[in-house]
Image (cartoon, rainbow, N blue to C red):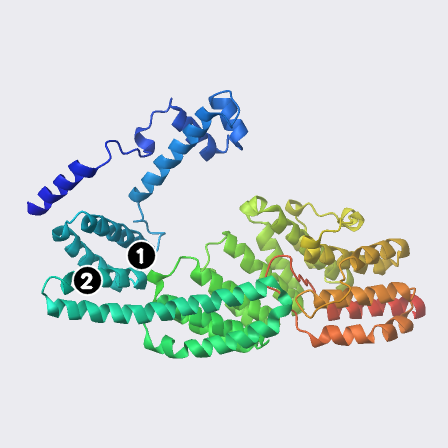
């Protein structure tokens, strides 16, 4: 009763007279708040111009529309304190994080108002919950407040307990923050320039070794995940993809032991990462076994499933398992929700279809044709060969892949003028001073094709003029991390050997 009395006294004295929340179940559907909310939510309003015109028949800069926007925003912000995180799809730690932050805020407000009788038990309960769910920052905040409280209330034993908890949490939080800083720095350096591979490799080795002791000392999800990520990154940038696979296996084992602390997509992300490593190893046997075991990880047809299938398709192409590649292609484009994919992803699968069509034509694998015929990609070979994508630096990988396969198709018929146009379009994607980054192999291949054109498609002269570029290309391993960047649908070595075969038969066959 004393606690309730104290809360009632505090609330009646200091509460806002009217708390504005946005409650969909009790809203007035004729109000302008509802019209603005529903218009944005349904996609009916695409801009402030649309909303202001429909609601007030005014310009969006007018005061009445600006006030409406501000008040709706405040209602929505107030409603953030009353979200429901108790859902099976939401990890336990996220629910705990939301509740602990809310309870910590309430306790601080109570302390500001002098209500220690209610605040201290709330903090003790929040501290225990934070410890259970490894929310180290909240654990430290609670312990520090409790330490301060007991230091002034003549309870020395309790003071020592919370002093110890605060010190341990502070050390653990320092280790977690350090691991965050290291991982974020590596990501930022590599994102700035793919030519920074050597620097990322050197730093990742240093950082994961620095974190080893803390990894062994603390039971921390955040620290452990960052440690695993950085160690995997080191193996990846050392081109030791076998070690990267082993590191990913260890990460998977750890994630399965701590599933309640992990987002639902974590195992999917690791499955994609591992398939990428098998692609770089060109290890079809283990990649295929992984694809079968990973079927239980994915919800078939979700976004991550489509990404996984891209890597699986490329693995099949790079390991010369062309019939299996065709089957993977069919399983993807035959999905009902394939049409709902972003245009960029659908375009990539259309390009994949062109490559597998080339394999069917040149390798005489007749069984492929009925498997890859699919109207959903809108693929017509004659139309595809006539396309000349406009130069776009941000679409370098995709456009290079399109133009490269067009070159191979045109070489089959030795159509010289279209060939020259394709090679000239490809040449635009070569830098004046190439760096050994993700685009280096594609630039080497383009230079090989440029030499072919300059040598007027003569076999011996082309082969001799291209030896240097070919050896440089072979010296660097493919580096592909999804999307269009550095997209290499077939190994460039395979494609160049096919080019030389055609040139030889053209002049000397």
Q: SS at mark 1?
A: helix
Of callouts 1 and 2, the N-terminal one: 1
Residue 480 image offset from top left, x and y in percent:
62, 65
Residue drawn 18% across the image and 47% down it: 113
How many neighbours does mark 1 have within 10 angstroms: few (below 14), some (14-19), or many (20 or more)?
some
Asked whether residue 357 is in view, the answer is no
**Number of marks:** 2
Q: Which mark is residue 436?
A: none
Q: Please name whichever residue, 111 or 431, is drawn nearer the observer in this view of the structure.
A: 111
Residue drawn 36% across the image and 36% down it: 74
Q: SS at mark 2?
A: helix
Residue under label 2, please give it: 148
Residue 178 image offset from top left, x and y in percent:
41, 69
Residue under label 1, please give it: 92
Q: Disc 1 versus disc 2: distance between alpha carbons?
A: 30 Å
In the displayed structure, would residue 111 be above or below residue 200? above
Residue drawn 76% across the image and 59% down it: 404
How many neighbours does mark 2 have within 10 angstroms: few (below 14), some (14-19), or many (20 or more)?
few
């Amino acid at each position: 009763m004393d606690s309730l009395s104290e809360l009632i006294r505090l609330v009646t004295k200091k509460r806002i007279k009217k708390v504005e929340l946005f409650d969909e179940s009790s809203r007035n559907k004729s109000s302008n708040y509802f019209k603005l909310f529903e218009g944005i939510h349904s996609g009916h309003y695409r801009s402030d111009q649309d909303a202001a015109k429909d609601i007030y028949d005014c310009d969006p800069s007018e005061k009445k529309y600006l006030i409406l926007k501000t008040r709706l925003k405040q209602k929505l912000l107030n409603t953030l304190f009353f979200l429901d995180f108790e859902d099976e799809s939401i990890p336990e730690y996220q629910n705990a994080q939301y509740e602990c932050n809310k309870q910590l805020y309430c306790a601080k407000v109570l302390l500001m108002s002098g209500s220690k009788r209610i605040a201290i038990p709330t903090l003790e309960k929040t501290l225990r919950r934070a410890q259970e769910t490894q929310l180290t920052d909240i654990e430290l905040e609670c312990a520090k407040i409790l330490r301060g409280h007991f230091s002034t209330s003549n309870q020395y034993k309790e003071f020592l307990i919370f002093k110890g908890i605060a010190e341990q949490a502070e050390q653990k939080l320092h280790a977690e923050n350090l691991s965050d800083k290291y991982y974020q720095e590596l990501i930022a350096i590599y994102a700035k320039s793919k030519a920074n591979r050597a620097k990322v490799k050197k730093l990742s080795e240093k950082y994961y070794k620095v974190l080893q002791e803390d990894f062994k000392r603390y039971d921390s999800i955040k620290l452990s995940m960052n440690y695993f990520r950085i160690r995997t990154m080191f193996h990846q940038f050392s081109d030791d993809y076998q070690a990267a696979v082993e590191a990913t296996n260890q990460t998977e084992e750890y994630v399965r032991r701590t599933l309640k602390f992990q987002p639902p997509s974590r195992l999917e992300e690791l499955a994609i990462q591992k398939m990428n490593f098998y692609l770089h190893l060109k290890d079809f046997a283990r990649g295929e076994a992984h694809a079968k075991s990973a079927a239980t990880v994915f919800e078939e047809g979700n976004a991550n499933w489509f990404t996984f299938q891209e890597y699986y398709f490329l693995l099949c192409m790079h390991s010369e398992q062309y019939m299996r590649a065709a089957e993977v292609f069919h399983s993807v484009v035959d999905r009902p929700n394939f049409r709902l994919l972003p245009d960029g992803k659908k375009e990539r699968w259309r390009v994949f279809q062109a490559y597998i069509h080339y394999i069917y034509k040149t390798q005489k694998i007749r069984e492929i044709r009925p498997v890859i015929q699919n109207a959903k990609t809108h693929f017509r070979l004659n139309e595809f060969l006539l396309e000349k994508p406009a130069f776009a630096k941000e679409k370098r990988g995709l456009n290079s892949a399109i133009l490269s396969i067009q070159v191979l198709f045109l070489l089959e018929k030795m159509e010289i003028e279209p060939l020259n146009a394709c090679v000239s379009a490809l040449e635009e994607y070569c830098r004046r001073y190439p760096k050994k980054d993700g685009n280096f192999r594609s630039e080497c291949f383009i230079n090989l094709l440029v030499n072919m054109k300059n040598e007027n498609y003569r076999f011996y002269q082309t082969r001799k003029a291209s030896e240097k570029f070919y050896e440089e290309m072979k010296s660097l391993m493919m580096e592909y991390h999804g999307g269009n960047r550095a997209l290499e649908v077939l190994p460039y070595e395979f494609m160049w050997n096919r080019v030389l075969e055609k040139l030889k038969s053209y002049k000397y066959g």
